[in-house]
Image (cartoon, rainbow, N blue to C red):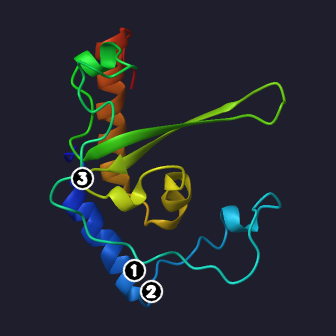
Amino acid sequence: MPLPESTDSYADRALAAQESAGGHLPLPADGLTTWPSFPFDGDLRARVLQPPVDVENARMGDDPETCWCRDPAADAGWPILWSDGRCHIGRWGDGGAHGHVWFIARPARMPQLRGTFMALWDDILPPLPADVRAANDAAVVARVAAAYGGVVHG
């Protein structure tokens, strides 16, 4: 199984897709822009994706000793994937009997992708190759099992 994809190779693929699309990544034609709940109308286009930076500026919570949300995963060496900058956690529910929890990894050194709009960028950026996604998934499952206990199946 291949190693998780590096930020540089991820950025190279995304920037190449942007270049081949005429300078802007296309919005997903079958994705969220067609949902009745999508809040925008008119001609939208994604901002130009910027290349990775050498080093990101430190932000609150970067020091594990002062992080307010420290947990066993932090002690186990998070981020799980060396290419992860942060993991955004989204919890959505519409008042029904269930909710949705999403973990969206942001590539390290790509601060343009931080914050609330990472969920939108996730739909715009090119998907990971299947083998890279499988390697990432396996690394995440193994680290969660090591941090919290449990058995990895499959």
Secondary structure beneath dot 3 equals loop
Left or right of 54 in this view: 88: right
Q: Mark 2 points at which residue?
A: 21
Relative vertical location of residue 36 with respect to residue 114 in this rendering, above or below = below
Q: In which quarter of the image is residue 105?
A: top left
Estimate how packed mark 1 is, as few (under 14), some (14 to 19) or many (20 or more) residues with alpha carbons within 10 Å: some
Residue that mark 3 sits on:
5
Q: Distance between the residues labelled 2 and 3?
A: 23 Å
**Image quadrant where residue 130 sits:** bottom left
Q: Position of residue 145 (x, y in %)?
A: 34, 16
- x and y percent of residue 99 in the render? 71, 30
- The residue where tag 1 is placed is 18
Q: How far apart are marks 3 and 1 (CA)?
A: 19 Å
State whether residue 19 is above or below residue 86.
below
**Quadrant of the rendering where the C terminus is positioned:** top left
Give the residue drawn at x 40%, y 39%: 87
